[in-house]
Amino acid sequence: MLCNIYLHRLDRAWDMGEHGVLVRYCDDLVVMCATRQQAEAALERLTGLLSGLGLEPKAAKTRIVYLAEGGEGFDFLGFHHRMVRSRGLGGKKPVLFLARWPSDKAMQHARDRIRDLTVRSRLLLWPELIAEDLNRFLRGWAAYFRFGNSADRFGKISEYARMRMALFIAKRARRTRKFGWAVLACRSPDQLGLITLSGIVVAPYPFKDWRVKPNAAGERRR
């Protein structure tokens, strides 16, 4: 809250027509420009405004990115943004659009949290309780990242959670990992209640409704 109050002066002083569209969340921001010249001018303007507040852009995170097919992307608020071209399935013409999915850093954070929830020091707990803890994290994580082209990365996190759950079961029973997988996949009718994430794929056309796809629990999400 204090960050937003302090940087509100930046928002008010910004000229969108001259320096591009400024999108800011707390102290993290991105400016969308039409040309490289405008981007360079925007960076100079941003640096000057922050200097007047006694601040400066963080060098490691500040750069100009040219969004083009096959080019680099950028991370913002946990998402990685990149220009890609749709496959043009079903006879549809391929479309160039800005896709987004959980960044590498966000993926590592999810793995770290899953590993913390299945750590050896929690072996005295029932596996069902571990699954409940995992589900609470997975639901929250998926709720944030569902707005994007996240299906592939959702699958990877879901599979990692299953692997850690199987390993937890094996360690608790002092058996092999194969035993843990057998309990999770075969001896439990619902994988001990562990949910499976299913991401959504957003239509690449601008101003179109998002596709709706049921998740593993049968709920419909946007």
Image (cartoon, helix red, strand yellow):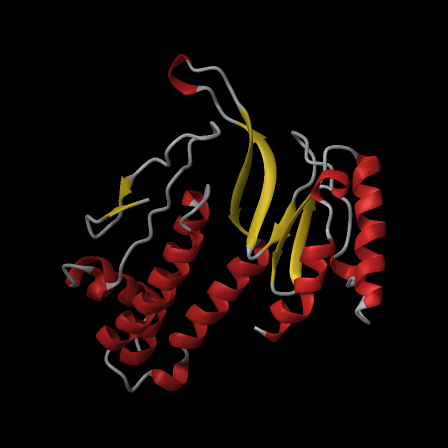
- 213 left or right, relative to 208: left
Quadrant of image for the N terminus: bottom right
Q: Classify 222 as above or below 190.
A: above
Tell me the quarter of the image containing the C terminus: top left
Front-most of 187 and 19?
Answer: 19
Residue at the image point whose x is 21% and y is 49% from the top: 219
Q: Residue at x 68, y 65 (%)?
A: 7
How many numbered circles are shown?
0
Q: Is residue 65 above or below residue 144?
A: above
Percent position of residue 118, x then y:
38, 75
> Which of the 4 image quarters holds residue 115?
bottom left
* Residue occupying image coordinates x 24% and y 50%: 216
Say which residue appears at 85% left-offset and 58% top-offset. 48
Q: Would residue 96 be found to the left or right of residue 175 on screen? A: right
89 left or right of 56 in image: left
Horizontal side of residue 79 vs 117, given as left or right: right
| Up-down relation of residue 94 to residue 161 (above or below) | above
**Residue at the front extreme?**
12
